Image (cartoon, rainbow, N blue to C red):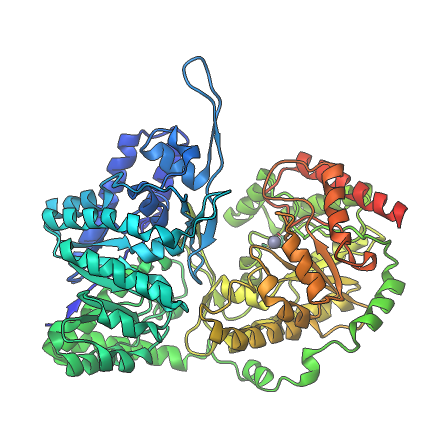
Amino acid sequence: MVSSANLGFPRMGANRELKKLVEAYWAGKVTEQELQQGSKDLRAAHWKLQKDSGIDIIPSNDFSFYDHVLDAAHTFGVIPSKYQHLQSGLESYFAMGRGLQRAGDANVQAVDVPAQEMKKWFDTNYHYIVPEFASNQQFSLANSKPIDEYLEAKAIGIETRPVILGPISFLLLGKAVKGDSVQPIQLLEKLVPVYEQLLSKLKQAGASDVQLDEPVLILDLPASIKDAFKHAYEVLVKSSPRILVATYFGRLDSNVEFLTQLPIHGIHLDLVRAPEQLDSVLKVLPAHQTLSLGVINGRNIWKANLSKAIETVIKAVQAIGSDRVIVAPSCSMLHTPHSTESETKMDQEILDWLAFSAEKLHELATIKEAVATGPASVQAKLQANADSLARRAASKRIHRQEVKDRVNNISPDQLKRRSPFPERQKLQQEKLKLPKFPTTTVGSFPQTREVRLARSKLKKGEYTPEQYDEFIKGEVQKCVKFQEDANIDVLVHGEFERNDMVEFFGENFEGHVFTQNGWVQSYGSRCVKPPVIFGDVSRSRPITVYWSQYAQSLTKKPMKGMLTGPITCLQWSFVRDDQPRKDTANQLAFAIRDEVVDLEKAGIPVIQIDEPAIREGLPLRRADWDAYLQWAVDAFLLSSTGVHDQTQIHTHMCYSDFNDIFPSIKRMDADVITIENSKSDLKLLNAFEQHSYTNEIGPGVYDIHSPRVPSVQEMQERVAAMLKYLPTGLVWVNPDCGLKTRGWPEVEQALRNLTQVAQSFRAQA
Ligand SMILES: [Zn+2]
């Protein structure tokens, strides 16, 4: 019979219990024992929830105190030497995730170790801790977490399928420790026996099945990696429970051939991202393999179309028989919030369209039931689902013809500035009269406790809007005054009125809704609450003009208007699934374009449109890059080109290496780009030179991720390095990113140093 399975459940709990526990533990407010007990209770609650929802195959070891890749590193003994002198349990674990600084005394030594690098988990907004391997790496089964959690579930009467990051993905997601040149995959031979040991222990403990996650299978893989898979899995199956290899976030493509030749028991496919792969896999699936069908979206929040999912499952059943078919979410539910139940304030009409993790479990169970015992058995549920989908499709709240018409009639003129850059540059120079090596900041200034407090008072009604307004005005005044005093050339208002760069705009655009409790894990204990884009997006009134205009009224220097770009809004939201992402991006772009035009009308001479997320939207397969970059850059152009030549458009990028998308950055045609360069990466500068970038550029000279104040001399060295690659007339001097996480004293000092650096170069020029 068809069975239902889950691949992973969100760890945080309905009210972010895990976050609170872990943070309390870090703060020394709860003991390790309390942390362990609280986590155990949470795991039990989640297992029971899944069981009660009718899921047949329930995951264990999907829980993590911080991150599942870090868990794998810790379990397999991949602990770089700088952490080895720490206590082997939670102390070294958390130190690897978030660093550890502790003053010493007579009894204990001082500790100061940095965190390991953090990277985005494929194209989600979850970040994992990058494992670090050494050439002489030794592996060992350093803890028994997967077995303990399997037994813990068993003890409360719940049989589970342990989830373990597969050996190939584990190695490929990692890197060599600093100063070592090992390619982690070379260590496979040494690693496999430890996996064998773990799997056989799980078998002895009674596990019949395990889920080995190998998400790298949806990437373009060289032949050597395919061989590595073959080698590893041929060994592993011998002593293991039955192995299901889970793939997600994309299509297997040519990787399907060797995968179906492995002696594994089953394969999981993401049929939400890549529904078309089902047919080709069904054709080649050997008789000994089962197929797990990811038909429910594990990373978006919309109710599924159950009848469509059922059709897909029936197709597979007809092809390979019901015993070999499993109904599952596309990927772990880690990327969706816990349950819609706590959304007590949301608009009822829109709430009706949503399914968070708990609701997705019911969807899975219903699909299974419909296939196993016939649709009649779940008729009422299917009908309710169909009705809800129909209501959503027909909702007047979603569709607005004038917005669609605008997107359908984009003209080539709307995708380019009126004149080419050299002409604009001249006009802007005449208007702005900036010195050489102009200085600016990326936008936000410290979001102090007082600023956050004022916002929360406004929310609670303890501040009237007028009081809040006065407060923010005071902050803007201080900020403008400081910038003038520090001799910055292009000023900003400081973004004090904003909670978050995407949420702020979403709250002011049509077609967005906000959850009360829709948290998803971003990294470690940090959770985010992405806006939900449910309908056609537009802007009904100016959003930022008031503050930019106010700030401009305080100074004769040019004030820079600050906006978030369309792709970043798209990437950091839950996006509607009833139209291509490209269309939503263009709607966002028009909304921003309207704001840009209004800022210009209000006399704001410089406007920055931030696109930190443009690189992270890149598809996982190279073959899909061009199509994405085409529409993503077009959306940026659409948002930014509605102004006259004299208006200077800036963009800002951070969080990634941009070297491989340079032609696209060029095509964005911003007059000025400020870009993160905190590693003072000569590769970045080299790329600017190689691609003969001609517009103006400010590679960051001040790493804002650290409270350290950079000295004049070190920033001078950075600018000097830039000048080896970039012509003097193009270089701006600015920090890496916004200053909102910093404190005022450091920021003041650092920016005064920064303007001094610019002055010293001007004197030489
Ligand atoms: Zn940034």
Does the rendering let one see residue 283? yes
Residue drawn at (58%, 56%) of the image: 501
Q: In the figure, is residue 661 to the left or right of 268?
A: right
What number of labels is visible?
0
Frontmost residue, 191 versus 496: 191
Frontmost residue, 520 versus 63: 63
Figure quadrant of the N terminus: bottom left
Frontmost residue, 589 versus 545: 589
Residue 532, picture quadrant: bottom left
Could you tell me residue 580's position as x and y percent?
Answer: 47, 78
Residue drawn at (58%, 68%) of the image: 566
Furthest residue in direction top, as rendered = 106
Residue drawn at (33%, 57%) of the image: 168
Residue drawn at (68%, 69%) of the image: 666
Could you tell me residue 297's position as x and y percent?
Answer: 33, 68
Could you tell me residue 127's position as x and y percent?
Answer: 44, 52
Does the rendering let one see residue 486? no
Q: In the figure, is residue 735 to the left or right of 283?
A: right
Could you tell me residue 220's position as x and y percent?
Answer: 41, 69
Residue 57, picture quadrant: bottom left
Instruction: Using the image, determine if residue 575 lies above or below residue 132.
Output: below
Q: In the figure, is residue 600 to the left or right of 626?
A: right
Q: In the figure, is residue 636 to the left or right of 31?
A: right
